[in-house]
Image (cartoon, rainbow, N blue to C red):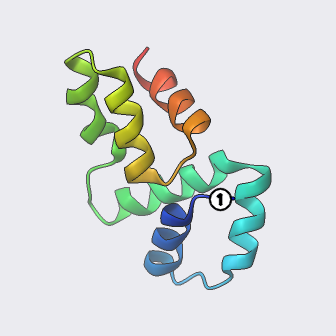
């Protein structure tokens, strides 16, 4: 099972939080918490959030591509990435 390893990697590398097992359990039960934590860390580091990177793709009417990009940038699963893109842009 994929419990958002990229998001967990960003959280542990950037925040100094070392309990990956706890993050995996959180991802199993509340994947949005992992996404929000990941987003907060990216914003703190003055990096563009996934929203800014996905916005031009959505503006060109490429929803599926936007969902794929969201998954790549955040480590979300398909269902969660689709929901995140739809909440943010539709």
Q: Nearer the viewer, residue 75 or 18?
A: 75
User: Residue drawn at (51%, 23%), measured in percent from left and top?
Assistant: 87
Image-based side of 20 in relation to 86, left or right: right
Q: Quadrant of the N terminus?
A: bottom right
Q: Is residue 13 above or below residue 68?
A: below
User: Residue drawn at (75%, 73%), measured in percent from left and top?
Assistant: 22
User: Residue drawn at (34%, 38%), measured in percent from left and top?
Assistant: 51
Q: Quadrant of the C terminus?
A: top left
Q: Residue furthest front?
A: 1
User: Residue drawn at (29%, 35%), measured in percent from left and top?
Assistant: 54
- Which residue is under mark 1? 3
Image-based side of 6 in relation to 64, left or right: right
| Quadrant assignment, res 5 | bottom right
Q: Secondary structure at mark 1?
A: loop
Q: Is residue 54 above or below residue 44?
A: above
Please provide percent x and percent y for residue 18: 62, 85
Q: Residues within 10 Å of mark 1 (few under 14, many from 20)?
A: some
Q: Nearer the viewer, residue 5 or 35?
A: 5
Please provide percent x and percent y for residue 85: 45, 28
Q: Nearer the viewer, residue 57 or 90?
A: 57
Image-based side of 34 in relation to 85, left or right: right
How many circles with numbers are drawn on the protein?
A: 1
Please provide percent x and percent y for residue 10: 45, 69
Please provide percent x and percent y for residue 12: 53, 77
Q: Is residue 15 above or below residue 1?
A: below
């Amino acid at each position: 099972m994929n419990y958002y390893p990229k998001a967990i990697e960003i959280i542990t590398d950037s925040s100094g939080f070392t309990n990956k097992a706890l993050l995996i359990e959180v991802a199993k039960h509340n994947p949005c918490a992992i996404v929000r934590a990941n987003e907060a860390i990216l914003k703190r580091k003055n990096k563009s959030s996934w929203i800014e990177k996905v916005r031009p793709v959505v503006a060109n009417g490429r929803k599926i591509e936007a969902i794929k990009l969201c998954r790549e940038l955040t480590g979300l699963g398909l269902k969660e990435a689709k929901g995140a893109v739809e909440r943010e842009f539709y």
